[in-house]
Image (tube, helix red, strand yellow):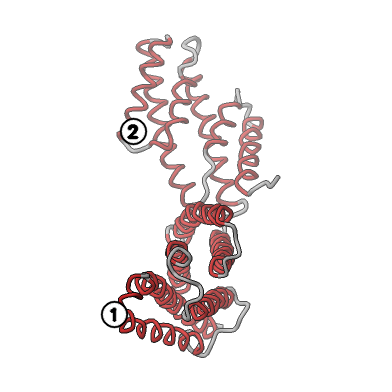
């Protein structure tokens, strides 16, 4: 079982909130503990944004709770009506993420109407604030998130999975059921990649000065994701056309196999160059042998058209029609890789000049 940074930070925020309550004799500490647990966010920016929203929502909850109890009492019906009112106000002010703590504050300050009520209400409100600030402090200072590394790792692993699936598909080495299961796993991973990219964007643009390096990294990572989506499109196209209508005995089939293997290897090398494992090439173009194979594949494919047009029997078997989307996907994949290679090349050379 793996303990992630967010789990660890939640536990530390909880401990800190309980310790503060103990140091200042704030009772009962359960409200601070709950507030700390609910307030941990994935980024420092979201922590500060959440802190502001929580403060606003809790002030609304505390003010309505105190007012309602002072004038109307703290009967269950009154508490329920106030909670409904607080929820509606929070929704109107777009403070949906703070609803739980706002309602918690209302219930806490309306828990009793006996004795020194204002002192009791302010104590409960203070406990909630202690929890919120404990979470914000821990999230900002302890194990700061590094989403670039996580995002690049996810992109690299997904690209490797695509490479394996594509290789097994064009060589017809995997059972259809297993192939579809693996493809679905990759599709589900795209959601995590998009979320990591959004978190990374917040990390480098909201709280830091945007530099050339950070801006370039963000553009490169976005293009890496675009290449992954192109690989998914290519996988779907190949699955639909390669073995359903396109005969492996066709003379273009070896060209397609070799070019796909060359392009996936090129993709891997581009990622390794960005990661600093490989030295950047002299220019940003794809390797000359890859370009030549692209041109050969296009030439051989276009040469088929007059042959199909003049031979009705070949037109009937659908070979050229099913080859068209396959070749188009390969050429577009190469274009996207070349664009990624250009971005990585420019970035690496700029980094080298700075050093």
- Residue 221 got which mark? none
Q: Name the spot of residue 81 as percent of width and height, x first.
A: 36, 16
The foreground one among 81 and 249 is 249
Q: Name the spot of residue 288 as percent of width and height, x first.
A: 49, 90
Task: Please tell me whether residue 293 is drawn above or below residue 140 in the rendered image.
Answer: below
Task: Please tell me whether residue 62 is drawn above or below residue 329 in the rendered image.
Answer: above
Q: Nearer the viewer, mark 1 or mark 2?
A: 1
Residue positioned 66% across, 34% down in the render: 19
Residue positioned 38% across, 29% down in the render: 60
The foreground one among 301 and 271 is 301
Query: In the structure shown, which secondary structural element does the residue marked by tag 2 occupy?
Result: helix
Which residue in the structure is indicated by mark 1?
A: 309
- Residue 91 got which mark? 2
| Image quarter of the C terminus | bottom right
Query: In the structure shown, which secondary structural element does the residue marked by tag 1 occupy?
Result: helix
**170 relative to 91 in the view: left or right:** right
Residue positioned 59% across, 54% down in the render: 178
Label 2: few (<14), some or many (≥20) within 10 Å?
Answer: some
Q: How many marks?
A: 2
Q: Name the spot of residue 5 as percent of width and height, x first.
A: 63, 49
């Amino acid at each position: 079982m793996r303990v992630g940074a967010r789990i660890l930070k939640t536990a530390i925020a909880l401990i800190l909130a309980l310790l503060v309550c103990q140091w200042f004799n704030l009772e009962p500490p359960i409200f601070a503990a709950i507030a700390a647990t609910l307030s941990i966010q994935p980024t420092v920016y979201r922590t500060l944004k959440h802190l502001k929203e929580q403060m606003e929502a809790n002030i609304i909850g505390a003010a309505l709770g105190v007012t309602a109890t002072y004038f109307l009492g703290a009967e269950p019906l009154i508490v329920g009506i106030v909670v409904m009112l607080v929820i509606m106000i929070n929704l109107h002010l777009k403070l949906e993420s703070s609803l739980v703590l706002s309602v918690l504050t209302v219930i806490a300050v309306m828990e009793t109407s006996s004795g020194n009520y204002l002192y009791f209400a302010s104590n409960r409100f203070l406990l909630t604030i202690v929890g919120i600030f404990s979470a914000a402090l821990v999230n900002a200072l302890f194990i700061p998130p590094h989403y670039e590394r996580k995002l690049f790792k996810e992109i690299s692993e997904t690209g490797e999975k695509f490479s394996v699936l594509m290789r097994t598909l064009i060589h017809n080495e995997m059972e259809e059921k297993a192939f579809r299961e693996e493809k679905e796993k990759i599709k589900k991973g795209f959601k995590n990649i998009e979320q990591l990219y959004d978190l990374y964007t917040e990390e480098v643009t909201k709280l830091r000065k945007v530099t050339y390096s950070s801006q370039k990294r963000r553009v490169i990572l976005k293009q890496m994701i675009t290449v992954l989506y192109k690989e998914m499109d290519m996988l779907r196209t190949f699955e639909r056309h390669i073995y359903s209508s396109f005969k492996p005995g066709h003379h273009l089939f070896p060209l397609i196999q070799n070019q796909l293997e060359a392009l996936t290897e090129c993709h891997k090398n581009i990622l390794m160059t960005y990661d600093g494992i490989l030295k950047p090439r002299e220019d940003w173009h794809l390797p000359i042998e890859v370009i030549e194979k692209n041109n050969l594949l296009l030439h051989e494919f276009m040469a088929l058209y007059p042959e199909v047009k003049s031979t009705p029997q070949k037109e009937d078997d659908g070979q050229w029609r099913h080859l068209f989307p396959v070749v188009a996907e390969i050429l577009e994949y190469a274009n996207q890789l070349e664009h990624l290679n250009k971005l990585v090349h420019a970035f690496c050379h700029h980094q080298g000049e700075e050093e």
